[in-house]
Amino acid sequence: MPANANSDRSAAGFSRGPAGTLLFWLGGGLFMMFMIAGLVQSYSGGHWLPPVGVEYTTQLNALERDRGPAATLPEVRTAARIDFDNEIAVRRLLESARQVGNQDDELWALLALARLKPEDSQVRLDLAAALLDRGRPSEAFAQARFAVWLAPDNPDGFCHLGRSLQQLGRHQEAAGAYRHALDLDPSSAAARSGLQSSRRGN
Amino acid sequence: MDRSTAGSEMVPSESLQRRLVGRTFVHPLFDYLLIGGGLSLLVIPIAYIYSGEHALVSLEFLPWFILLSNSAHFAASTVRLYSKPGSREALPFLTMAFPLLTIAVLTVCFLFADRTGPLLQAVYLSWSPFHYAAQAYGLAVMYSYRSGCQLSLMQKRMLWWIAILPFLRVLLQSADKHFLWWFLPDPTAVAVPPWSLPLQAGIVMLGLLALLLPILLYLLVWRSKAGTMPLISLLVVVTNGMWFIVFTHYDGFVWATVFHGLQYLCIATIFHVREQRARPENPHGTLYHVFWFYGTSLVLGYGLFNIWPQAYVWLGFGPAESVLLVIAVVNIHHFIVDGYIWKMKPGDSNRQVIATASSSSFTS
């Protein structure tokens, strides 16, 4: 019940006359037409209580069953972009993008997830990997550094840090990162091969 | 009624207990539990004790709950706009042209859903906690006025700033979900140092202030010439704060939506019943007006939230944008309409309902 309300005097004169009445009936008529169309759509699909809010995902699921993930990807993308604060919608886009192999959508979803779940080190790692795959090592380095900061005991974080440092040409630091990963997990094949290639300066 | 003398006329010499309870609309229990938000302080802990983290997740029950409470509450502002005596003359633009404008804006937004959708979503998500806070402030002032507590301009300003503290906290706490996000260079950076430390300190500080300052203001008003502020004014501000401060962002939003909707439906129904019963030609009793108002709000809520999005699906738009854009626009429409229909201008029926009606006249 906000108390700070402005007057609508400016449009009052216009809305008070026959033009106002016309606008009202136009609006009312249009709304009724929308209601009829909506009722037809709902009841033809057997939905007495059509979905509200996040329940739109049930309709997306049905679409995906009918048309397959590739054809539904645009719908899933729009859902995630509008419902940007909904982790379920964004994870759904990530999953669909990976299924279809759409790297742009995968990267977008990971960036959105990093914003929604900033404390999730796995999201940071996935984001760093996606950025590395797209040849963006400085951004990948920043994300890998976050991942290491969030989960200092996870050797994968140091491996990603090493990969991004290698792509930036900082081989000595990369070797240090891989060594740290090996300290945490001596059996890590990724850290071992990364250390070898960083020593060679690749 | 002259504002300066209203209090002394309404409350000549009452006991401390009566002054603390204040003048309620229906019954102290009803007003304190449903309008003051007291029920939330009882229901929420019970829900968590019995259901734990799943207190808010019941997919079978949720659609019906949304329809009966939340959707009906959003529609109630429109029902009240058209049923309030004199609103068509006082608010010609809002009553005549605004519906068509809303439909037009929504339909244009559909054509560019990827770009307009996030914008509409951010606007309505940012506006919601402000709307709740503003409602808490409005109700606190209304009960004070009704109970003869003459808040000074300064006291009202202080109350307003205190009432919107939970909103400011929500903006800081979830900066990435609201319009502050647009001004942050790297949204992910707010979660880690150096941003995270001052932000966390600010969030904790605002939370404490939102719960403590209402009590301090209450005592300040008590000691001033304004008179005793009814406890419901304090309760309504504190409960709004608690919904957003005690719970996580998502849970806070859901609980606030639930109890704000209930609060809104109750107060809107009370005003509607009083206005309708005050009409000289009115042949109906209270129950008729209660059921008419709620029933109409329910049907309109069903149309707005359940049916309208399906019309856009029928037109060929995707289910996600159909549902999300309609929700955002109906929310924004509700916020705007609310900004007008609760005005307290002299001569407005709102002022008459607050100042003149007693508890017994609602139920009689």
Image: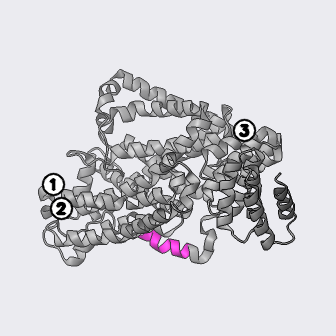
| Number of numbered markers | 3
| Depicted B228 relative to depicted A94: above or below | below
Q: Secondary structure at mark 3?
A: helix
Mark 1 vs mark 3: give the one in front: 3
Looking at this view, is A115 or B22 the one in front?
A: A115
Q: CA distance from mark 2 to mark 1?
A: 8 Å
Q: Quadrant of residue A76?
A: top right
- Please tell me which residue lies in front, A186 or B223: A186
| Chain of the residue under label 2 | B
> Which label sits on residue A74?
3
Chain of the residue displaying label 1: B
In three-dimensional space, the C-alpha distance between marks 2 and 3, rounded to whole angstroms, equals: 58 Å
**Nearer the observer, B89 or A200:** A200
From this viewpoint, is residue B319 visible? yes
Relative to B232, say whether A49 is above or below: above
Residue at the spot of label 1: B3
Q: Main secondary structure of the magenta part?
A: helix
Q: Which residue is mark 2?
A: B150
Q: Amino acid at mark 3?
A: Pro
> Disc 2 vs disc 3: Cβ atoms closer than 8 Å?
no
